[in-house]
Amino acid sequence: QVQLVESGGGLVQSGGSLRLSCAVSVSISSIDILAWYRQGSGKQRELVATDSSGIFRNYESSVEGRFTISRDPVRNTGYLQMNNLKPEDTAVYYCSARGNRFGPTEYWGRGTQVTVSS
């Protein structure tokens, strides 16, 4: 079983930056897909960014060029660097992980709140 704990959220002004962290309870090298999702108030959860085996990265179009997903195999931690934040980025951000050795389950953290003021 994989446990994920997000941190790094908070209140920031428009144009500011935050770095979210996702601590993983197993070797992050065993995680095939590391992803960040977000869910704004009254909205559906949406995929923000994915990291495939630390090699391939994809981003939702509204965050392309502003957000960067990465992983640190030494710290077993995933990151989401968020720059030039906008009020519409306000949401609870969730980390998820999937790995073939863990079966088909997608594991989730409990989320961290990001609030961007205008």
Image (cartoon, rainbow, N blue to C red):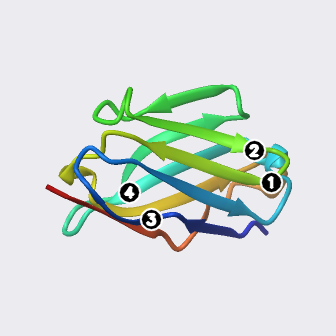
**Which marked residue is nearer to the observer: mark 2 or mark 4?**
2
Disc assigned to residue 9: 3
Give the amino acid at mark 1. Answer: Arg
Residue occupying the point 38% across, 26% down: 65
* Local SS, label 4: strand
Residue 59 found in image quarter? top left
Q: Which residue in the protein does label 2 denote?
A: 72
Give the amino acid at mark 4. Answer: Arg
Q: CA distance from mark 3 to mark 1?
A: 19 Å
Q: Earlier in the sequence, mark 3 or mark 2?
A: 3
Residue occupying the point 79% across, 46% down: 100
Q: Which residue in the protein does label 1 denote?
A: 75
**Which marked residue is nearer to the observer: mark 1 or mark 4?**
1
- In front: 84, or 46? 84
Q: Are marks 1 and 2 in contact (CB under 8 Å)?
A: yes
The image quadrant where one finds the C terminus is bottom left
Residue occupying the point 26% across, 62% down: 40
- Judged from this view, the residue extending furthest toward the bottom is 110
- In front: 99, or 90? 90
Q: Which residue in the protein does label 4 denote?
A: 38
x and y, in percent, of residue 87 in the image: 19, 53
* Local SS, label 1: loop
